[in-house]
């Protein structure tokens, strides 16, 4: 299907379930194929905002299709970044979802300028077009029975965890977020979580509060107070290991969003394969297709 210069075009539909059966619907007493609906789109999205939020991170908001705006927490997009002067980024860049608004038909990303691709993103201005593909991957899952959950993030993980704030509120789950950064001014998502009624505990290297031992004390206190039915984490292998140890000790579930270099983003190239421990057996999984969200206890650093 050709792309419209105004809205882009749907180019593929990729299902993550294992069923290959064609959906059917009963019409007039008979069986006929259900209307086809894309789950993943590639389109030219319109830039709404692209501005700095602190010394390191920039906030990118784009208008998009209904399908893209239906992205779920933990999913990601593949962005075809503009080419900055003198550079030619070739592959799309994976970017975790920072926010999605189905009513406004917008998606948001938080990125740090680190290479040719993100330098290209930095050149975008309102009204420019950006080629996006998504939503991709398996996102977070919230159990309706959870009353309290703890989200632990550092660095880019603070962006990945951000959509959980709204999802948890809709689920009736209270959130305690433990956010880690090098310096207080580099913390992001704090106000976003506050607006959704979450409690935020900030720890930083500069204040010497971000070490695993102190974070473990904080998490043990949450557990002792009955404020942790599940762990959610992204961005730090050291803090993930702390949560794995506590989850094992107290029998708590957890989920982790894994960060990994990717090429295709749809499971074809096997560039993003990582090892996982599943019931004592080491297995290989593609982060882009089987994840990027995985069971906390199966993840390896």
Image: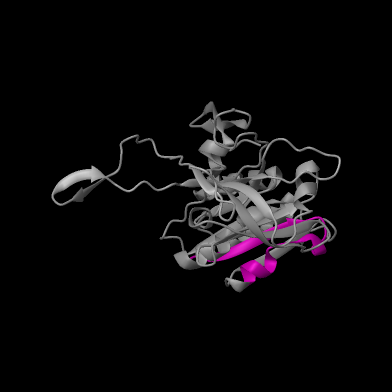
| Residue 225 visible (yes or no) | no
163 above or below 95?
A: below
Callout count: 0
Give the residue displayed 71% in from the left and 53% down from the top. Answer: 154
Q: Nearer the viewer, residue 72 or 276?
A: 72
Horizontal side of residue 22 vs 41, given as left or right: left
Rendered view: 193 above or below 80: below
Q: In this view, does 44 lie to the left or right of 24?
A: right
Residue at figure coordinates x 60%, y 64% from the top left: 176
Residue 101, given in percent of the width and then of the height, sits at 54, 64
Q: Position of residue 30 (x, y in %)?
A: 15, 46
Classify the position of the C terminus by image quarter.
top right
Colouring chosen for the image of the structure: one colour
Q: Nearer the viewer, residue 175 or 65?
A: 65
Q: Where is residue 139 in the image (x, y as percent from the top left)?
A: 52, 48
Residue at image location 69% in from the left, 61% down from the top: 127
Residue 141 horizontal side relative to residue 121, left or right = left
The residue drawn where x is 62% and y is 32% is 272
Observer able to see residue 113 = yes
Relative image position of residue 198 (x, y in whole percent) = 59, 69
Quick check: is 178 in the magenta stretch?
A: yes
**Which residues are drawn in magenta?**
173-194
Residue 146 falls left or right of residue 156:
left
Q: Is residue 73 magenta?
A: no
**Res. 59 image quadrant:** bottom right
Q: Please name whichever residue, 267 or 86, is drawn nearer the observer in this view of the structure.
A: 86
Nearer to the camera, 11 or 155: 11
Say if 297 sits above or below 198 in the image: above
């Amino acid at each position: 299907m050709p792309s419209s210069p105004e809205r882009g075009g749907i180019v593929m539909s990729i299902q993550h379930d294992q069923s290959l059966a064609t959906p059917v619907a009963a019409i007039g007493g008979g069986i006929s194929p259900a209307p086809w609906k894309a789950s993943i789109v590639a389109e030219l999205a319109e830039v709404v905002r692209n501005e700095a939020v602190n010394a390191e991170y920039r906030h990118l908001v784009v208008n998009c299709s209904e399908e893209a705006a239906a992205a779920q927490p933990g999913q990601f997009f593949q962005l075809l970044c503009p080419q900055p002067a003198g550079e030619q980024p070739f592959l799309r860049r994976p970017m975790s979802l920072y926010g999605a608004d189905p009513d406004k038909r917008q998606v948001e990303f938080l990125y740090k300028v680190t290479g040719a691709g993100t330098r290209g993103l930095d050149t975008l201005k309102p009204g420019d077009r950006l080629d996006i593909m998504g939503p991709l991957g398996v996102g977070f899952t919230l159990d309706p029975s959870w009353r309290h959950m703890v989200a632990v993030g550092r660095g880019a993980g603070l962006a990945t965890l951000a959509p959980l704030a709204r999802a948890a509120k809709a689920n009736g789950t209270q959130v305690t977020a433990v956010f880690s950064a090098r310096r207080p001014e580099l913390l992001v998502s704090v106000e976003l979580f506050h607006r959704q009624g979450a409690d935020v505990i900030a720890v930083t290297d500069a204040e010497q509060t971000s070490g695993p031992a102190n974070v473990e004390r904080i998490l043990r206190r949450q557990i002792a107070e009955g404020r942790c039915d599940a762990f959610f984490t992204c961005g730090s292998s050291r803090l993930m290991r702390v949560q794995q140890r506590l989850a094992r000790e107290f029998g708590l579930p957890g989920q982790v969003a894994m960060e990994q270099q990717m090429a295709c983003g749809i499971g074809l190239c096997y560039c993003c394969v990582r090892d996982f421990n599943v019931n004592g057996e080491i297995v290989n999984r593609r982060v882009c297709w089987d994840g990027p969200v995985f069971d906390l206890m199966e993840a390896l650093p």
